[in-house]
Image (cartoon, rainbow, N blue to C red):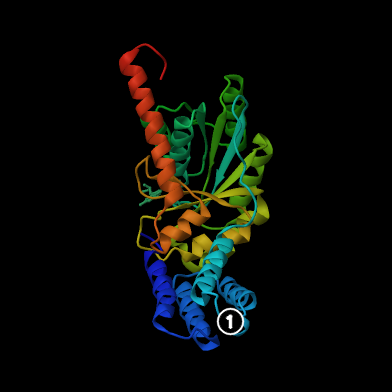
Amino acid sequence: MVLADLGSKIAVALRKMTQTTIIDQTVMNDMLSEICKALLQADVNIAQVKHLREQVKQGVDIEQMAGGINKRKVLEQSVINELCSMLDPGRLPYAPKKKQANVIMFVGLQGCGKTTTCTKYAYMMKRKGFKCALVCADTFRAGAFDQLKQNATKAKIPFYGSYTETDPAMIAAEGVDKFKEEGYEIIIVDTSGRHMQEQALFEEMEQVSLAVDPDDVVFVMDSSIGQAAHDQASAFKGKVAVGSCIITKLDGHAKGGGALSAVAATGAPITHVGTGEHIEDFEDFEVKSFVSRMLGKGNIAGLMEKMKQADVDLEKQVRYTTHPYSPL
Ligand code: GDP
């Protein structure tokens, strides 16, 4: 998994402190240097790495600490806290509400996994009890509508798009209006990605945004983007009101630190991550669980979420077998 390497390097740096009897400024500095090196190798933005080091140094006065205090634990906790705050912009993401239309617009560069992610998100939200629909407002890429249609059909999610209309803002507005009238609760608008940060892409994005007035704009970013991630995230943030981020391809072998840390540039929290090409390869993102899993400490929150979902599925199954005609 992406960042497994980073996680183990940080874990090793933290563990090394157990081998020293006296934890002093030198031990702390060595540990911090090792962690910063690992973060930089994983493509984390240099300013954020510096910030992390300064924060730990400022927060832990190792020489003045009273004798009985477990310095190793204090330092470890401080590093973990800083890793968490690097990934947490301190703002809650938009939470879709039931019994009303929530328009969610997806933006990102071509190939980042945006169209796939739109369906994964719709599928997950459908499982959480929302009435979901998909709108394809990508008129730029040939085959974009067919791809969304194919994915949506597989997931049994209604979709809207056009083979002839060339104005993405028009299609987006039509699709959103139609699904609003039909009482859909989550209406996902997939926009064009294009190849790079070109002016036309941003203008189109702004027009679609004006046409559908989204409740949330989700920025989708490929985890393999590396150091370019920070500039890319800032460019998108500068044009549309990015409210949430989704990082894709976390199952790959890329370093991943660039994309994950670049999210800070948007000021918007990561809500989900993509972990494969299949529709189920999609997870809720929770900062503490992610950091603890990255450091090899297990993922308690994620496990609990999976258990809750398994309970719901089991309950539905039981209901269906005992009352085959009751709604699932
Ligand atoms: P778009 O151009 O941004 O709409 O990108 P697509 O949705 O067409 O995805 C581009 C490629 O990335 C496709 O081959 C997807 O199957 C793949 N992809 C998307 N998300 C993930 C992911 O989380 N993991 C992996 N391994 N592949 C993904």
Q: Dividing the image into 4 quarters, which one contains the C terminus?
A: top left
Nearer to me, 285 or 138:
285
Give above or below for 286 relative to 232. above
> Looking at this rendering, what residue extends furthest in the bottom direction?
26
Q: Which residue is mark 1?
A: 62
Q: Residue 182: x, y in percent?
A: 57, 19
163 vs 212, left or right, is: left
Nearer to me, 315 or 225:
315
Q: Residue 157: x, y in percent?
A: 44, 28
Q: Residue 323: x, y in percent?
A: 35, 12
Q: Residue 149: x, y in percent?
A: 42, 32
> Looking at this rendering, what residue extends furthest in the left direction?
321
Quarter holding residue 123: top left
Nearer to me, 82 or 46:
82
Residue drawn where x is 53% and y is 45% of the image: 192
294 vs 102, left or right, is: left
Give above or below for 143 relative to 247. above
Amino acid type, label 1: Ile
Q: Secondary structure at mark 1?
A: helix
The reply to whether residue 145 is in sight is no
Give above or below for 200 relative to 102. below
* Badge 1: residue crowd in 10 Å (few <14, some 14–19, many ≥20): some
Residue drawn where x is 38% and y is 62% of the image: 296
